[in-house]
Image (spheres, grey):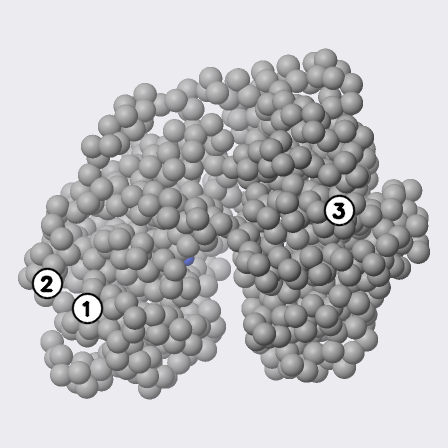
Amino acid sequence: MKSGNLGYPRIGQDREWKKALEAYWAGKLEEEALHAALKTIRLGNLKKQLEHGVDVIPVGDFTYYDHVLDTSAMFGIVPERFGYAGGEVGLDTYYAVARGNRESAASEMTKWFNTNYHYIVPELGEGSRPQLTRNRPLEAYREAKAELGIEGRPVVVGPYTYLKLAKGYAPEALDAWVDRLLPLYAQVLRELAAEGVAWVQVDEPILATTLDEADLARVKRIYGFLKSEAPGIDIMLQTYFESVDAYDLVVSLPVAGIGLDFVHDGGRNLAAVQGRGFPADKTLGAGLIDGRAIWKADLRGKWETLSALASVVTADRIVVQPSSSLLHVPVSAARETALPAELRGALAFADEKLAELALLAKAGRLGIEAIAAELEAAERSRDALQRSPARTNATVRARMATLASQPAARSSAFGTRRVVQEAKWQLPPLPTTTIGSFPQTPEVRGARQKWRKGEWSPAQYEAYIQEQIRAWIDIQNDIGLDVLVHGEFERTDMVEFFGEKLAGFAFTAKGWVQSYGSRCVKPPIIYGDVELPETMTVTETVYAQSLTQKPVKGMLTGPITILNWSFVRDDKTREEVAYQIALALRDEVEALEAAGIGMIQVDEPALREGLPLKREQWAHYLDWAVRAFRLSTSTVRDETQIHTHMCYSEFHDIIESISALDADVISIETSRSHGELIGIFEEHTYDKGIGLGVYDIHSPRVPSADEMSHMIDRALRVLDPGLFWINPDCGLKTRGYEETVASLRHMVQATEAARERYAVRP
Ligand code: GLN
Ligand code: ZN
């Protein structure tokens, strides 16, 4: 029995990778120096895996930006607009596809399955003529061998996953694309075999999603072809993030090994191995160590699962693996010395997971006694966390015990609330508002730094924030917006800000994970019961409201977004944790209302991305997600107006749930989706307040009032003008001052014109 890894974080202990990339982009690092810096990181990563005793070390998982983009570059798949003429894809073209350049927009980027990692979507235009430009896995293999004597296992994104994630082809053309790519994959594999490479890891996470018969037929065809064209190499067909529905078909494919996730599979993969058996001539990649979570493994429990597997598969045909690449966890927990000891002790980031892999494989070989000391130490740390007072808060538990009777519906239906709210708020038709944040200028960020470093007293910092709020209340009044916001100047990030104030959260010093390209995020850790010790937003909101006659919207991040953008404790279900957060947020909502704030927005931009990979699990997730939102927002008076905001437009599948949130007003991004969203409302009209973003905030461009009028007209063809709001797509924190003010002025002009056109004068 061996241990193996599937991928290691690229970013480096101190985000050296990010710094090198950004220095190169800024013209501060020469290309040669970039290669050298990244090579140091890459070899360092390999060395670590070697030192931790991992037997099977992945090579080629490292990247200059994104592994899906690497696959496109390897096959010469570059969108036509970049003027690529074949041959090796140069670094500047590579980065232009990822980030855009002066002439051409970047390729789209989207979430990698249900993770927070974003990949560059391959564009398979009609004109593309795929070719093998470089055998990247082979280069990686040679380097690891030459430099460190490592006999690595090259990693490639599998052909079917690659094609299913790509865009730019008609569904009927999928088979032709399979035919076009397969010979290139075969060539990569043949060259690896010729080099003496024994195993290659072919990642096919698409096999863990819901596939139809035609998909499965293609998968069969693909692996049959690779077997016949490159017989000299053993393929570890790697799945992850969920169970494999077509288990029988997948294990019968002509490959030498199958990698399965035994952590995020809901027990289904284990049941399949036990119930259906596993082919005697294949190796099982046993994904036992959680590649997505940050907690120390329950080694005894893992060993039991491993033993169950070993009663079906002979031990020498098992490789103990993480459930997925370790790309999704931070590098090393060892340096998190500022965390509470009981928390730090229970953490396992990538490096700690490497050690767990080696230990578990050892237990598999020699019996659990062989790791008795380590097992005991791990159990002690896990117990210490479990006994931590933060873990069990009596007040929270008492409240959770009454969950069934906690109100999760407003006392009146929207129809009734609407009448009360119209009477109370007396807003003009087509009311205008913004999504919450105003520009976080370097000056605002600098002020926060000074306060954090102690150069400024809290009072100084608060005074500064108040100045910003006052300035922007004046600006909003001057522009003529109807519903104002305080501007969120005191917040860095919409989850971090709340996490820092709620009990049960902790923040690491270096717990970065890659989100996309060089962008890394440091997700909060929810490790204890969640409670609101004191109000979080009342002071700033009430201050803003004191400066104007117009309503100021309170601004909170919703329970599901906080949950989905954090690392979450593993001794409770996500559903339970969501309800805890929801009840804490309810306290804040009630405090805002009691302080005279009559409009409260609860943002849920991450609601959709939490959808499970398998459709049959969607309803359950959406049920509890909607309930959590409603637990937070339902106890207010009829006249109090609840808003929500989401920034994505793929609504088709979840429109019922969006409506079930029962928010009085929702604002949604629209301008980048080219009217797609508007089409949805032709089928399902929306019967509550709704604002479709009338301009894209992701670019500094100032759109004209005419352009916005056009957006408004399009929306009002399908939506009721009596329920329509006018707002930008999303928050304005990444924008500059000038462009923000200019765009909002145009938005108000467009609104005034629309009020005339639709004869809905105030
Ligand atoms: N209220 C937040 C803001 O305006 C919303 C951000 C978001 O939707 N991602 O910045
Ligand atoms: Zn948004």
Q: Is residue 701 left or right of residue 184?
A: left
In this rendering, is residue 488 above or below 458? below
- What is the quadrant of the C terminus in the image? bottom left
Where does residue 389 sit, x and y in percent of width and height?
A: 42, 20
The residue pinned by badge 3 equals 236
N-terminal-most mark, 3 or 2: 3
Question: Which mark's residue is nearer the viewer, 2 or 1?
Answer: 1
Quarter of image, res 69 = bottom right
Q: Quadrant of residue 104?
A: bottom right
* Residue named by callout 2: 422
Q: Secondary structure at mark 2?
A: helix
In-front residue for pair 638/533: 638
Task: Please tell me in which quadrant of the rendered image residue 394 appears.
Answer: top left
Give the mark, 2 or 1, whose residue is nearer the N terminus.
2
Location of residue 247 in the rendering, given as x and y in whole percent from the top left corner: 62, 45
Q: Which is more toward the observer, 235 or 99?
A: 235
Helix, strand or loop status at disc 1: helix
The residue at label 2 has a CB less than 8 Å from ligand 1: no
Mark 1 residue CB less than 8 A from any atom of ligand 2: no
- Which amino acid type is shown beneath numbered disc 3? Met
Please name the residue shown 34% across and 64% down the image. Answer: 668
Q: Nearer the viewer, mark 1 or mark 3?
A: 3
Q: Amino acid at mark 2?
A: Glu
> Which of the numbered marks, if any, corresponds to residue 723?
1
Q: Amino acid at mark 1?
A: Leu
- Alpha-carbon neighbours of circle 1 within 10 Å: few (<14), some, or many (≥20)? some
Q: From the image, state whether disc 3 or disc 2 is nearer to you.
A: 3
**For marks 1 and 3 on the same chain, the one whose residue lies earlier in the sequence:** 3
490 to the left or right of 194:
left
Q: Is residue 523 rendered to the left or right of residue 95?
A: left
Viewer-side residue, 34 vs 670: 670
